[in-house]
Image: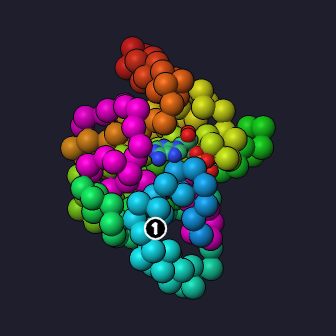
Amino acid sequence: MKITIKKSDITKESVDAIVNAANPWLSGGGGVDGAIHKAAGPELITECRKIISKIKKLNTGEAVITPAYNIKNVKYIIHTVGPIWQGGNFEEDKKLAQCYLKSAKIAAQNGLKSIAFPSISTGAYGYPVEKAAAVAVKTIMNLEENFDEIRMVLFSDYDLEIYERELKRYENK
Ligand code: ADP
């Protein structure tokens, strides 16, 4: 399985699915969530409301899938809710790992072969990027599903460097 780390706007990627760092109400917002909703168009919020009317809220570490609507070169969006950083003693690492695991599971269930992830929880949710990168890389490297490619899409040079360093560190273990 190919693991790629790059700097980009995730809405511009060509993959079977992009992952959204959503909120429990799938209501859109800022950060990557806002960018994805903007790029997908209004049909996405309509679909999200339908899902929420059934499940009430999406719990931390869970994931749901929707079409990608107006996002070119992407078939699906997998929405997951990352943990809010509370200092590290509230199973944030386990919950963050769950986001990657559940997203991969739902992708595999839908026959998808390539997934792009953003750096879940490290924006508004305040998870330190160094710690989040360690969890993300370790979880992705140990996925039991077999994808053609998992892509980590970072939004800043700093985040890119952190994830690249973490991947190298992990490969040399
Ligand atoms: P969370 O609430 O899970 O912390 P955020 O969207 O606030 O989610 O931040 C998660 C990460 O996504 C941050 O590193 C942020 O810089 C990054 N990000 C924001 N917009 C985009 C985008 N268009 N493509 C990829 N990553 C993005």
Magenta-span inclusion, residue 23: yes
x and y percentages locating residue 82 in the rendered image:
60, 52
Q: Residue at coordinates 31% horizontally, 46% vertically from top-left?
A: 13
Please give the count of numbered marks on the rendered protein.
Answer: 1
Secondary structure type for disc 1: strand
Please identify the quadrant where the N terminus is shown: top left
Task: State whether residue 33 appears in this view.
Answer: yes
Q: Which residues are magenta?
A: 1-26
Q: Amino acid at mark 1?
A: Val
Q: Residue at coordinates 42% horizontally, 77% vertically from top-left?
A: 43
Left or right of 113, for residue 119: right
Q: Which sits in the foreground, 34 or 173?
A: 34
x and y percentages locating residue 9 in the rendered image:
41, 43
Residue lying furthest top: 172
On the rendering, which quadrant does ligand 1 occupy?
top right
Image quadrant of residue 54?
bottom right
Q: Which sits in the foreground, 144 or 88?
A: 88
Image quadrant of residue 169?
top left
Q: Residue at coordinates 57% horizontally, 69% vertically from top-left?
A: 26
Q: Which sits in the foreground, 5 or 99?
A: 5
Mark 1 surroundings: few (<14), some (14-19) or many (≥20) residues within 10 A: some
Please identify the quadrant where the C terminus is shown: top left
Left or right of 27, for residue 111: left
x and y percentages locating residue 172 in the rendered image:
39, 14
Residue 30's place in the image compared with 96, above or below, is: below
Magenta-span inclusion, residue 4: yes
Q: Residue at coordinates 26% horizontally, 49% vertically from top-left?
A: 14
Give the residue pinned by disc 1: 64
